[in-house]
Image: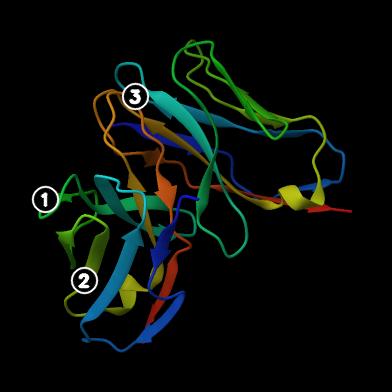
Amino acid sequence: GDSVTQMEGPVTLSEEAFLTINCTYTATGYPSLFWYVQYPGEGLQLLLKATKADDKGSNKGFEATYRKETTSFHLEKGSVQVSDSAVYFCALLNTGFQKLVFGTGTRLLVSP
Amino acid sequence: DVKVTQSSRYLVKRTGEKVFLECVQDMDHENMFWYRQDPGLGLRLIYFSYDVKMKEKGDIPEGYSVSREKKERFSLILESASTNQTSMYLCASSRVAGGYSEQFFGPGTRLTVL
């Protein structure tokens, strides 16, 4: 079945450091890919998405490119802030379905 | 502003109790979902509903049931709570669309079963 694998956390960075959180997937067909963020004490929010190969999703300084050849959707940000501390989930949704498949989540901790 | 609300943020129940978790959305969405979130396991789908009185099993439905009598409300029921159902429960909703439709999440209910 479909699955998403993302790097274990926590990822600990200093403010203004470069961030990469790796995500790879296994799926039949041509899924859409997503990054969700969960701030402390809150539900999940959609951060960005990409619906076809080579698409780049971006939001709030975060970016991710849908790479079909490597089945990856790595999350990047050039300069993280303390307010980016959260749990980040990679997810996929296959064509014709409304059910998301989530990775296990990666906690990001940014210190001043 | 889009809103999904859940009846409780924190809940403590005893083994064997019947537990109701309520979710309400104000966006007139057709789809509603219940997930549980556990460390190291991410989010796993328990049940979802495409319409009033319609329900479909997700990946881990055992020990749970659901009810959707009104479009805006989706309830998760633990018929006889057990300690392995201690978890964070998240509700979400989305509209019906040809392609992907964003899921909006509630703040979650942290349930502890003693």
What is the chain identity of the residue bearing mark 3? A
Residue B103 lies, with reference to residue A29, above or below; the image says: below
> Residue A104 versus residue B21: which sits nearer the camera?
B21
* Residue topped by disc 2: B77
- Rounded to the nearest whole Å, what is the CA distance between mark 3 and mark 2? 31 Å
Where's residue B45, x and y in %? Answer: 30, 51
> Residue A55 versus residue B93: which sits nearer the camera?
B93
| A88 sits to left or right of B16 | right
User: Given the image, on which type of amino acid does mark 2 rest?
Assistant: Ile
Which of marks 1 and 2 precedes in the sequence? 1
- Label 3 Cα crowd, 10 Å radius (few <14 / some 14-19 / many 20+): some
Q: Quadrant of residue A22?
A: top right
Please identify, in this view, whether the residue under mark 2 or under mark 1 is nearer the observer. Answer: 1
Determine the secondary structure under disc 1.
Answer: loop
* Residue topped by disc 3: A27
As drawn, the label of residue A11 is none
* Residue topped by disc 1: B54
What is the chain identity of the residue bearing mark 1? B
